[in-house]
Amino acid sequence: MSGEVPLWEVFIRPRNGLSHKHVGSIHAADEVMAVQAARDVYTRRGEGNSIWVVPSKAITASDPAHADENFEPTSDKIYRHPTFYDIPEEVGHM
Amino acid sequence: MALFNAVLELADDHLVLGHRISEWCGHAPMLEEDLAMPNMALDLIGTARTLYAYAAQLEGQGRSEDDMAYLRGEREYRNLLLCERPNEDFAHTMLRQLYFAAFMHPYWQTAQASGDAVIAGVAGKAVKEMAYHIRHAGEWVVRLGDGTEESAQRMKDAVEALHAYTGELFEAGATQDVDDLPDRSAIRDQWETTIDDIFAQAGLSRPVVQFPQLGGRDGRHGEGLGHLLAEMQSVYRAHPGATW
């Protein structure tokens, strides 16, 4: 049966103020059933207060074959990490 | 004693239907429903537990919620016949769930204002659960009813088979003399509105029932309940007092 039922990616927002996070995928006939299935599969233990579902086929992924040219060039650019200055004590938690 | 009997009827409805739905666990047509149905079963069984514990307390004979559930025979069970109807196919299961939830949702809405603190408490929790059961089962009824030729036929067959059991929802039963529980007959209009709205989308119609099926409240059940109880009660009866 699952062969005929479209796949959906599920995103859950754990709390207000946080962003939706990808948690997995489910099968459902349409978007209404997809939200219900996501609720039943991924929010059984109070994981969140908002659900997004997106048709998996709507997602364009980067090509694993391009991983080297996509991601390798950043590995020697450590100056992009904001770790080269001291934060004064008085600033507290940032 | 009137309240005890009325609470027991409600508890039996929830346990028997909850057990029926739990029978799908591991057998549902897809993983998503294999989780959705135990979710619904646990909602119903959770409500049953609170009600059995309350009934036991009202009775004051030292019985526990487990004694209520596991040590009564089928003639002592007071559940609606609708709740014990076999799962059959997915159309039957979803329609039975819709029929029950479309009644219990307005029932618990009214019961939230009950003068009985336990009933009002159960109602506050159950009203949200029943709203979801209507939505989940209702969406399936719409999709099966308005789906393929085969799914539409199965949905029609389910309506044909189960509709005769819906009249019992509105019978007073033991609530006759109980002020703290809603008047069941007063819920009929709201129930019909909910069903008609979903049936209109599903391309189904509400049949006229010639011979309503009654008797659950008097302990007169179909053959299926005996089998259900035998399976559900076997562990408790084989190992009385066992804990884990």
Image (cartoon, rainbow, N blue to C red):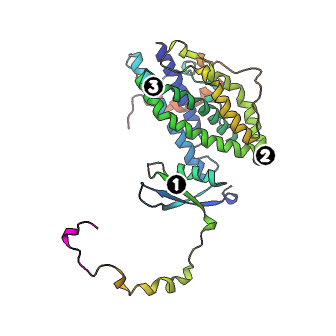
Which label lies toward us, 2 or 1?
1
Predominant SS along the magenta part: loop
Residue denoted by label 3? B119
Image side of residue B229 versus residue A81, left or right: right
Q: Residues within 10 Å of mark 2 (few under 14, many from 20)?
A: few
Q: Chain of mark 3?
A: B
Q: Position of residue A53 (x, y in %)?
A: 57, 58
Label 1: element kind: strand
Is B219 one of the magenta-colored residues? Answer: no
Q: Can you see residue B89?
A: no
Q: Quadrant of residue B134?
A: top right
Residue denoted by label 2? B150
* Vertical relation: B221 (above or below) B22: above
Depth check: give the residue in front, B214 or B146.
B146
Q: Residue at x 67, y 57 (%)?
A: A5
Q: Position of residue B10 (x, y in %)?
A: 53, 24
Is A90 one of the magenta-colored residues? Answer: yes
Q: Quadrant of residue B165?
A: top right
Q: Chain of mark 1?
A: A
| Quadrant assignment for the C terminus of chain B | top left
User: Which region is colored magenta?
Assistant: A85-94
Q: Residue at x 58, y 39 (%)?
A: B133
- Could you confirm whether marks 2 and 3 are on the same chain? yes
* Type of the residue with mark 1: Ile
Q: Position of residue B187 (x, y in %)?
A: 61, 24
Identify the mark nearer the N-term, 2 or 3: 3
* Vertical relation: B179 (above or below) A89: above
Depth check: give the residue in front, B100 or B72.
B100
* Type of the residue with mark 2: Glu
Image side of residue B244 versus residue B7, left or right: left
Q: Chain of mark 2?
A: B
Residue denoted by label 1? A51
